[in-house]
Amino acid sequence: MRAARQLTSVGVFGVVLILTAFSNFNSVKIDEHKPSGFLILIKNTDTGLELVCEEGCAWKELFFSLKRDKFQMVDQHGITLKGRNQPSKDENMSTFLFRIRKTKTGINLEAKEGTSWTMLTFSCADNPCSQYIDQNGMTTKE
């Protein structure tokens, strides 16, 4: 009976130890994917898209033509490729990557890293129209 109690105590201690280790492992993993701060104004124009980065980027303005339903990858360094090499980390700059696409009714964004959102869509029937985005989604400039 005494041996059973000792075995039960060891078993409970082992379970607590495993849960504590797993809990600490998960918290580290979550922190690695924490969204970083940026503020970008997206403008739909007659000829394509204009992006103006006001915070968290190495670039200030990007202009590119984009046919409807085609996409372009954008990160903290500017226009990029889908299979890009990971740039070095810079404390003064955010780390993000998203895909932007013009649709029949507006703009569609798909986040790949550095945001708390995965998809954003906003209508943009009139040219020009604009929308601010940040690491948390669609926003307004304060």
Image (cartoon, rainbow, N blue to C red):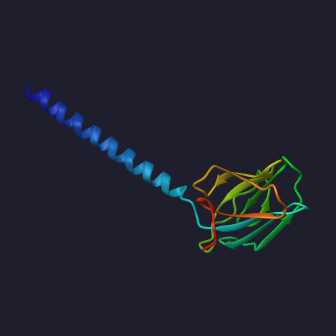
Q: Position of residue 66 (x, y in %)?
A: 87, 55
Q: Nearer the viewer, residue 91 or 37?
A: 37
View extreme (front): residue:
126
* 71 or 22, nearer to the observer: 71
Toward the top, the furthest residue is 1
Q: Residue 94's x, y, as percent?
A: 63, 67
Q: The C terminus is located in which quarter? A: bottom right
Q: Position of residue 35 (x, y in %)?
A: 57, 60
Q: Is residue 42 left or right of residue 113?
A: right
Residue at image location 60% in from the left, 52% down from the top: 117
Q: Nearer the viewer, residue 40 or 115?
A: 40
Q: Position of residue 51 (x, y in %)?
A: 77, 66
Query: Going 57% across and 55% down the picture, which residue do you hit?
Result: 116
| Depth order, front residue of 97/47 | 47
- Determine which quarter of the picture holds residue 98: bottom right
> Compared to 57, does 44 lie above or below?
above
Residue at 49% over, 57% down: 31
Quadrant in which the N terminus appears = top left
Q: In the image, what residue occupies the spot 66% across and 65% down?
A: 88
Q: How many marks?
A: 0
Residue placed farthest to the right in the image? Answer: 47
